[in-house]
Amino acid sequence: MHTAESLHPALFARLIDGLYTEALVMADEARAYFDRQGDADKGRYDTMTRLSFTCESLKVTTRLMHIIAWLMSQKAWQRGEIATDSLDDPKYRLGPAAQTDEAVLAIMPAQAKHLVEESQSLYDRVLRLQQRMEAAFSARRSVAPVQPTASPALELLGRLEKSL
């Protein structure tokens, strides 16, 4: 499941650490916005819009928690706490996250809209990374092991030794 095995460990660690930091910062921004400013912003809307706003805040939180959990699994794998074969277990995979309806996004305040779009973008990037890792791992599994071929030079040496 892992192209990470084929990457330089330090490069993979930096990639995961960067995504992890980005997800944590975004989670903190989302919490701060939806806890404080979000209440003031959604107070200006009708009941259905407020409900949509609340649902979107939950979607953002869910996306970010799925991302953070997946990245933590990758960090644990790097430290040898999770075996490579175990990463196929659904508990170590990126959880599903609902997309936001464009009509709902259009009526949201600018900061809420930004958080929704950024969380979707980060989720999509992490999902692509997971899919590429799975594809590379599957390709490696399906390739038959290469049988070593005898070197023509070694064959010649062997024949020479036999003739002596």
Image: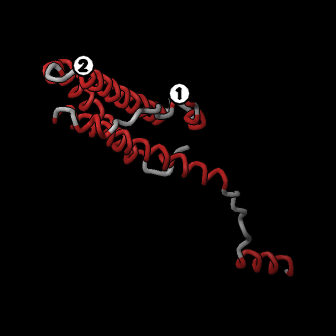
* Mark 2 Cα-neighbour bin, 10 Å: few <14, some 14–19, many ≥20: few
Residue 22 showing in the rendered view: no
Q: Nearer the viewer, mark 1 or mark 2?
A: 2
Find residue 106 and report its horizontal and vertical position in percent: 23, 38
- In the rendered structure, the answer to whether residue 44 lies left or right of residue 98 reads left
- Identity, as a three-letter code, of the amino acid under mark 2: Thr
Mark 1 lies on residue: 91
Find residue 148 and report its horizontal and vertical position in percent: 71, 65
Q: Between residue 99 and residue 147, name the one nearer to us.
A: 99
Classify 152 as above or below 35: below
Asked which secondary structure carries label 1, the reply is: helix
Residue displayed at 20% across by 28% down? 29
Mark 2 lies on residue: 47
* Mark 1 Cα-neighbour bin, 10 Å: few <14, some 14–19, many ≥20: few
Residue 7 showing in the rendered view: yes
- Identity, as a three-letter code, of the amino acid under mark 1: Lys
- In the rendered structure, the answer to whether residue 46 lies left or right of residue 91 reads left
Q: Which sits earlier in the primary sequence, circle 1 or circle 2?
A: 2
Find residue 13 and report its horizontal and vertical position in percent: 38, 41
Q: Quadrant of the C terminus?
A: bottom right
Q: Quadrant of the N terminus?
A: top right
Residue displayed at 55% across by 50% down? 135
Distance CA(mark 1)–CA(mark 2): 36 Å
The image quarter containing residue 85 is top right
Classify 7 as above or below 151: above
Residue displayed at 26% across by 36% down? 105
